[in-house]
Image (cartoon, rainbow, N blue to C red):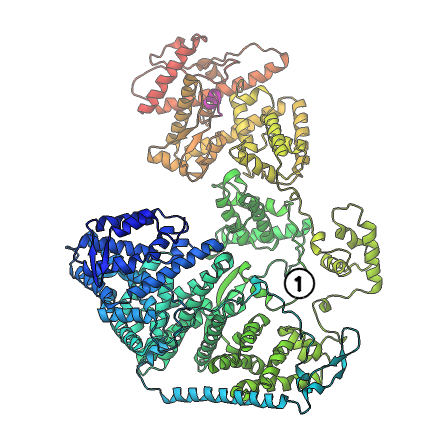
Amino acid sequence: MDLNRMNCELLATCSALGYLEGDTYHKEADCLESVKDLIRYLRHEDDTRDVRQQLGEGQIVQNDLLPIIIQHGQDKALFDACIRLMVNLTQPAMLCFGKVPDDPGFRYHFLQVTSHLQSYKEAFASERVFGILSETLYNLLQLDWEQRQEEDNLLIERILLLVRNVLHVPADPCEEKKVDDDASVHDRLLWAIHMSGFDDLVKFLASAQSEQQWSMHVLEIISLMFRDQTPETLVSAGHARSAEEKQRDSQELEALRQKESAEKRCRTFQRGTRHSRFGGSYVIQGLKSIADKDVIYHRNLHNLKNYTHDIGKAVRRVPKRNRRALECEDKRRSALNVRLFLREFCVDFLENCYNHLMYLVKESLIREQTQQHDETYYLWALSFFMGFNRGNGFRADLVSETMSIRAFHFIERNITNYYEMMLTDRKEATSWSRRMHLALKAYQELLLTVNEMDRSQDESIRQSSTVIKSNIFYLMEYREIFLTLLRKYDETRQPHSYLKDLVESTHLFLRMLERFCKGRKNLMVQKARRKKSQGEKKSAAPETSPEALAETWKIVEEELRATGFQLSESLSESIVPFDATSETPLEEQRTEAMVRVQDALLARLGPEALGLLRAAREVWPDGDVFGSTDVEPEEELELLKQILHANLPRPSPPEPLVEEEDDGAEFEEEELESVQVSETEFNFLDFIKRFANPSIMHPYILLLKSYSKNTPHTNHCIVRMLHRLAVDLKMDALLFQLSVFNLFNKILSDPAAAAYKELVTFAKHVLNRFFSLAAQNNKAYVELLFWKNVGAVREMTEGYSKDGLVLSLEGKKPTWTEEEEEELRRLYEEHRHSEVPDIVETLLPLLSNSTRTRRQVVTQLVRMGLVDNAKELKKQMKGTQIVLWTEEQEQELQMLFEEYRDSDDVLGNILKKLTAKRSRARVVDKLLSMGLVSERRELYKKRSRKAQGKSSGRGMTEEEFLTGLTQDFPEDCVVRDDEEDESEESEEEEDEEQGKEESQNGRSQSMHSTVGRRTDVDAMVNELQQDGMSVPLLWLQNCLNRTARDREEDGFSQPVALVPLTEANEDAMENKHFQRLLRKLGMRAPANEQESFWRIPAKLSVSQLRSAAAALTPRENEPKHDEQQDGSKIVTAEPEEQEEEEEEEVSSDQRAQALRALLLARKKKHNTTEHTGISYSAVFTEGDSPFAMDMDANGDADSDREDVSAPVKRRRKMVLIDEEEDED
């Protein structure tokens, strides 16, 4: 579309608005509908903003919309539509395009839209336009909130947005070539606002309690009104110049006059007395040319000192990323009448509006009720109005809202955020830099205001100032903010004006801090103590011999028993078993936590080791790696002993690279170090020493290079800081650098040097100190080539090492003789192709000097050029060579899992068959990520059963089932970790061999272990009975029987929660001994925080559940053998082998005893006044090992001869028994 020609539909719509005849505008009948059509057209414009450009070319705002609202403002609907359309047309070009386009085509459209906005701004600079807007806004504000409609609020907001958009339009530098004190378009717009009374409405909106919702709009309008102003120019508006100002101006004029006269004298001396055609040629002896001969000079001699080889060379183009940041727009001085009205506005605003408005804006910012970057308006207002208040007869009460520690904290947090965003968002680094500069100026103004409060005549104001200074000097983040900003200064992102404000703010802060320290002997401040990394300082490895471990354990055990296994509250809170911010997976940190426990034990720190163990148990409760949740102190002691004697895998620390020794290195890595905050006594000179660093000196020297353009105050701030370092700290050698001396030479040879007396005096002092030192140290001229830190300064001034060599990082290390270097070279050449895993470890024992460390060998190999980088010799961590999984490796892993998923050791078999060898942790993580397993415990190694048929739960006796349960939960409650190294494979093979031997020995040993473990369960039951937990035991037995019956009827299994409904049962479930019994029986504890109850696992069969229920019967009153014959009958299947007959008889006796004990206990419980006979029957078959209990209410003596082939009848009797128990 040709944008120079208006679209026919747009042209027809604009024509339907009306026409302007002289000063009278005649609207058409369809004027309102045409305005609405234009709004719809703007809604559907393309990326080039074609509709906006065509309307701008047609001057729709100047010729139609503004005349309509001026002459037809009484038509409310038409007025609202026109305001709505103009808000859209005047929105900034940056909002239309999102950013300044990089494409040339879109850049052209961007500039076109901007030019149309500038023409709109000129049209709005009319008192009639703002008179209508002011009148309309005044009428709307007269309405109470009960009478005000939603449309009225929308119109108020649109008027404020329209004024904001018009004020936001930038000036056209090509058209507005105005000098200071001349009225620009922006000045004329401000004057129209003032004459219409709109500025009074803005002040009303800022101060009224009922108009708080417009606070951000008002602040934006005010900031745009004062866009070209500075507080100093407004303060001085209308006042005669003071004597100080006159003196300052005269000094500037005198400096300019001296400079001009000096340049004039130089030009006079440069004129030669000889004719120009016979200037002559000269040979400069000692200065070589390209051809190794002396340079031939063809110019006059007076220009000889300016000769350089660079004359005539093309200037090298500086890459865009290395160019200096551009300065912001310069401020200009507005017309006097505009400055006077703005000055009155500032005075009224401070007295009536400032504190109220800033409070509202701050609350909106804190609650995030504003738009993005709206905090910049707050920062500007704080800086501008506090500066105006400071210059216009300072009154602390006018700015009390922003004069607090909260304001310091808010600005410091924003400075930090802006700097981080400047580094991360590189495309918008310039915008973030400007915001950071704005925050710095606000921080500077806060310091200036506090400094002004010190001079107040009011004692309360001076006390308030002292309180504020005590806080900002005490807290570390406020005290060190300027150190950080100077160290992080980047001239490619931050402009020269930012550096100027930073240097002046640092000077002010140090001056205030110095005065604050005077008269205070013991000033305590907050200090950050940084923990050094493990690579910097290695403690001596503790002795791990058996005798030493035994002695260590004896000391630790005595210490723990003496404290009663109780830990102090401070110790419990300070121990953190894992790092939530670390990139190391949580499962890998579990192994590190175990190593930390062992280290604490080796260091004989018993309470710390116990606290770390308990904290790790809370983080990793699964698998009971650090003990179960109900572990006893004695069991914890045994677990600590096992950890102490365990051979845990320890990752070897990475080899640190050789780096230059620099005091500034600690600053570069301070974010990576852990910080502990403490209090310490403050010393001002020690604080100044932190500025003695090349990274902080560089910004000062960079700013000093523009000394001729700097203000006298800026040059004073620079010289004062350099004087503190060179004179107060006696570190003048910090300035012994060639670029600094070149700058001093430029200052001393400046024709106007008389205007920079302070700079000249300091430069002469430094040069005198250098030449005095050079007379004693003949290497001082070489030192000029380098920036120096504190260590280098000390060596340069106090002397070098004993051998007379410059002390460097290598000078501190043991030297290598030529024979040792030749030996190292020979050994390296012999073994470099030997394919050893670590060539450095191979070379160390072969060297003649056995005191050489790995780091020294690596450093020497790099220095000799045998390897390119120390990283090539870095130790290879075990199991970390392979990180990524290929598609073929994933398929192989899936096939191996499907093949071995039913084996006893799934993970072990996979690791043996896996082609690409990986650690257990990597394989487990991959299986979890592929969804082949849902949790890690599914990969735990299963204990081998004594018989294949018993593993399924069928054909198992009650004692064999309990044996299986107790095997899964050993006494020490220590579970093998699933992430141990490959060393477990040998242990697994030994387990398999032991299993084979046990299977060959027969069932005799199994029988004895079964009886022993059953005895443990009986002992637990008897102990709980004595503690008065008979009712919970009976309830647990009921639950097991009921679950067994349900699973038998339904034909499938699912976990069943054990939900206690009585207080006695709830207390029992919280009892540690009762929970231990539950584990013995195979019950599952709550897996995570989302589960609250213990559960009966789905894997337990019906027979196992009934066997577990029978195991809960106490055996304290064991019946005699004759009673067994009268009360029960044991039926067994015929033995298939003669060898098993005796074993079957033994198991039958045990089952009979268990049954008799259970029935006797129930008989005691169900004792009634009726004389009833009870008969019991227990039936056992080979196919169904659980027993069945029958109770006959009629006391039939023949019940023991019940038909064995009637399972339905027996089940019915079991149901009756359970119902009777429930009723009890």
Q: Is residue 1180 magenta?
A: no
- The stretch of residues the image draws in magenta is 1099-1107
Estimate the x, y position of residue 1010 in percent, counting from the top left. Answer: 56, 26
**Location of residue 704 with respect to 653 vertically, above or below:** below
In the figure, is residue 927 to the left or right of 435? right
Type of amino acid under label 1: Glu
Identify the residue at image location x=54%, y=29%.
1013
Identify the residue at image location x=55%, y=49%.
583
- Secondary structure beneath label 1: loop
Q: Quadrant of the C terminus?
A: top left
Residue 1112, quarter of the rendered image: top left
Residue 203 appears in the figure: no
Estimate the x, y position of residue 692 in percent, counting from the top left. Answer: 57, 74
Estimate the x, y position of residue 775 in percent, counting from the top left. Answer: 71, 85
Given residues 1004 and 549, the one toward you in this image is 549
Given residues 1024 and 890, the one toward you in this image is 890
| Residue to which mark 1 is pinned | 659
